[in-house]
Image (tube, grey):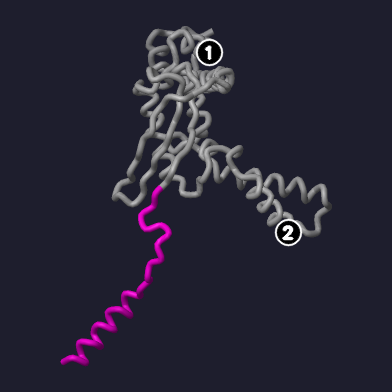
Amino acid sequence: MADISAKDVKNLRDQTGAGMMDCKKALKETNGDINKAMEWLRKKGIASASKKAGRLAAEGLVDSYIHTGGRIGVLVEVNCETDFVARRKEFQTLVRDIAMQIAACPQVEYVSVDDIPAKFVENEKSIEMGREDISDKQEDIREKIVQGRIKKRLKELTLIDQPYIKDQNKTVEELIKERIAQLGENIKVRRFTRFVLGEGIDKQESNFAEEVAAQTAQKDKNS
């Protein structure tokens, strides 16, 4: 068993936000390996977060993020259980990070797979079942292949299944569960909206070279 110093415990706490006793226990369980201790705490956080998942979360924050240049904007509502936690810096930082995540993931349309309409899922299944690359497979094999493809497709559309932009080794869901363990309350992303400048507007595309040629011809005609 490696000797666990107060410095090691503080270092782990600074990186994870977990309590001192939890950090000390994590280091003992992993023989002083700080990276393994972080993984241990993450697993512990996920376990404790699942116990809080059914609790009502009706407080929280609505926050915004405007990407540099003002071409992409996000509004997001993240809920917690009490106004006290909503005012904590750790929660506010989480909300801002989630807003940035949404801005960085243009393919994301839903919070979780549960939010995706059944009609959309059925349509995706119909498309995949009709693909030529599996047309010669047996029915049960085709079904398994299609289920795998659909599962992957749905996760591409959901926020909580995305790799966290600041740490690709964990998902947004894992990030949220870590904060649940840290703050002691259930936390849920309720809804979000992404705004992209000019989206939905029919723009007239012009060829710059043709435009210059047309202007030159007009000048020659007038001279």
Is there a contact, CB below 8 Å, between mark 2 and mark 1?
no
Precedes in sequence: disc 2 or disc 1 = 1
Q: Residue at x 50, y 22 (%)?
A: 186
Residue range in magenta is 195-223
Rendering quarter of residue 82: top left
Identify the image quadrant of the N terminus. top right
In this orientation, does residue 36 appear? no
145 is within the stretch colored magenta? no
Number of the label disc, if any, that sits on residue 5: none
State the residue position of label 2: 130
Q: Height in image: 172 above or below 44?
A: below
Rendering coords of residue 150 (x, y %): 66, 47
Q: Residue at x 33, y 44 (%)?
A: 66
Rendering coords of residue 45 (x, y %): 53, 20
In this orientation, does residue 199 appear? yes
Crowding around mark 1 (Cα neighbors within 10 Å: few <14, some 14 to 19, many 20+) is some
203 is within the stretch colored magenta? yes
**Label 1: element kind:** loop
Rendering coords of residue 135 (x, y %): 78, 59
Whether residue 106 sits left or right of residue 154 in the image: it is left
Identify the image quadrant of the C terminus. bottom left
The residue under label 1 is which amino acid type? Asn
Q: Height in image: 4 above or below 106?
A: above
- Towards the viewer: 146 or 168: 146
State the residue position of label 1: 31
Q: Residue at x 61, y 37 (%)?
A: 114
